[in-house]
């Protein structure tokens, strides 16, 4: 199924949302709970499938939903369709501070691998499935486990990541990355995990025990602030009582 060309605008700086303009009859799909606002005449429905293939049976759609559950995602994809006679807009917001980027899958041979929480929304016709890492090291220590999200199609997809998003072009080169900073990469790259250094560096260097290593020719998207790193800093600032429970003080009470 060929994806329609959709118009969009990314709004905001660090807490961004993407506003998608739909022609009459056009549909955009999104991760469950991503919608921020929508104009009149746009209806939405949660479905098992992503709508990329109209030939799938009910059991095929259930299987796709099961794969998404295995990846830690919602089993439903929300479909937004413009039922009116004129153009209407719907927007989708990022779940935490960061950036949203639009990626044309045609630029990457119609396929892209990304971390499980990177997908935000896409043009109808985009297939959202899972891919298993091929190496045990990447599976156990890669931060994303054995499972990555695989996006197939010929239209626009919108990805979200924490902090600033950086695009790197590799031409037969090697790039080593903090495992949490990897957002997406093209399938032609060799993806593996290596230890960060000797034992002292691994445990005392503060850079984690392992680094993701990408080799070959292709495109890599990175994020400067993984959500896990942000969460760790927030948790570290929460005062603890002797029993380990969080304790906040807002002044004396009578």
Image (spheres, rainbow, N blue to C red):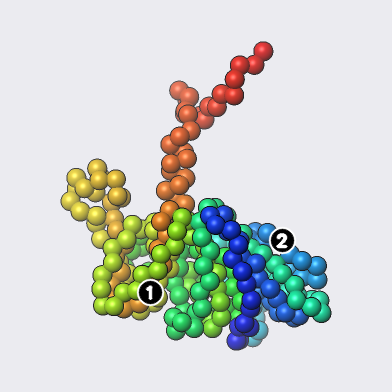
Quarter assignment of residue 69: bottom right
**Quadrant where the image shows the C terminus:** top right
**Residue at the spot 26% in from the left edge and 70% down from the top edge:** 174
Relative to the observer, which residue lies in front, 87 or 228?
Answer: 87
Q: Against 182, is 1 above or below?
A: below
Q: Residues within 10 Å of mark 2 (few under 14, many from 20)?
A: few
**Residue at the spot 65% in from the left edge and 81% down from the top edge:** 57
Q: Residues within 10 Å of mark 1 (few under 14, many from 20)?
A: some
Q: Against 217, is 192 above or below?
A: above
Q: Are marks 2 and 1 in contact (CB under 8 Å)?
A: no
Q: CA distance from mark 2 to mark 1?
A: 32 Å
Residue 62 percent coordinates (x, y): 62, 72
Quarter assignment of residue 39: bottom right
**Residue at the spot 24% in from the left edge and 43% down from the top edge:** 204
Q: Is residue 166 left or right of residue 210?
A: right
Residue 253 percent coordinates (x, y): 64, 16
Q: Earlier in the sequence, mark 2 or mark 1?
A: 2
Residue 100 percent coordinates (x, y): 53, 64
Q: Considering the numbered disc 1 on the image, is that residue within a helix, a strand or a loop?
A: strand
Residue 37, numbered circle: 2
Relative to the observer, which residue lies in front, 3 or 1?
Answer: 3
**Quadrant where the image shows the N terminus:** bottom right
Relative to the observer, which residue lies in front, 125 or 8?
Answer: 8
Q: Which residue is mark 1?
A: 219
Q: Considering the numbered disc 2 on the image, is that residue within a helix, a strand or a loop?
A: strand
């Amino acid at each position: 199924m060929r994806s329609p060309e959709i118009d969009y605008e990314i709004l905001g700086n660090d807490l961004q949302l993407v506003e998608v303009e739909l022609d009459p009859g056009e549909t955009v799909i999104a991760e469950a709970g991503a919608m921020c606002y929508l104009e009149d005449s746009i209806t939405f429905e949660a479905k098992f499938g992503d709508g990329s293939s109209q030939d799938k049976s009910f059991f095929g759609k259930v299987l796709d939903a099961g794969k998404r559950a295995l990846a830690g995602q919602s089993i439903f994809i929300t479909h937004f369709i413009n039922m009116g006679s004129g153009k209407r807009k719907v927007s989708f917001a990022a779940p935490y501070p960061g950036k949203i980027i639009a990626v044309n899958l045609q630029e990457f041979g119609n396929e892209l691998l990304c971390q499980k929480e990177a997908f935000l929304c896409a043009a109808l016709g985009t297939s959202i499935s899972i891919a298993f890492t091929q190496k045990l090291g990447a599976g156990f220590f890669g931060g994303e486990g054995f499972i990555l999200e695989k996006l197939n199609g010929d239209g626009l997809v919108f990805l979200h990541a924490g902090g600033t998003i950086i695009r790197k072009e590799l031409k037969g080169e090697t790039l080593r990355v903090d495992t949490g900073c990897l957002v997406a990469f093209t399938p032609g790259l060799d993806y593996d995990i290596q230890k960060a250094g000797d034992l002292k560096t691994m445990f005392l260097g503060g850079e984690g025990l392992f680094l993701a290593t990408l080799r070959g020719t292709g495109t890599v998207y990175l994020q400067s602030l993984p959500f896990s790193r942000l969460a760790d800093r927030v948790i570290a600032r929460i005062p603890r009582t002797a029993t380990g429970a969080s304790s906040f003080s807002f002044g004396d009470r009578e």
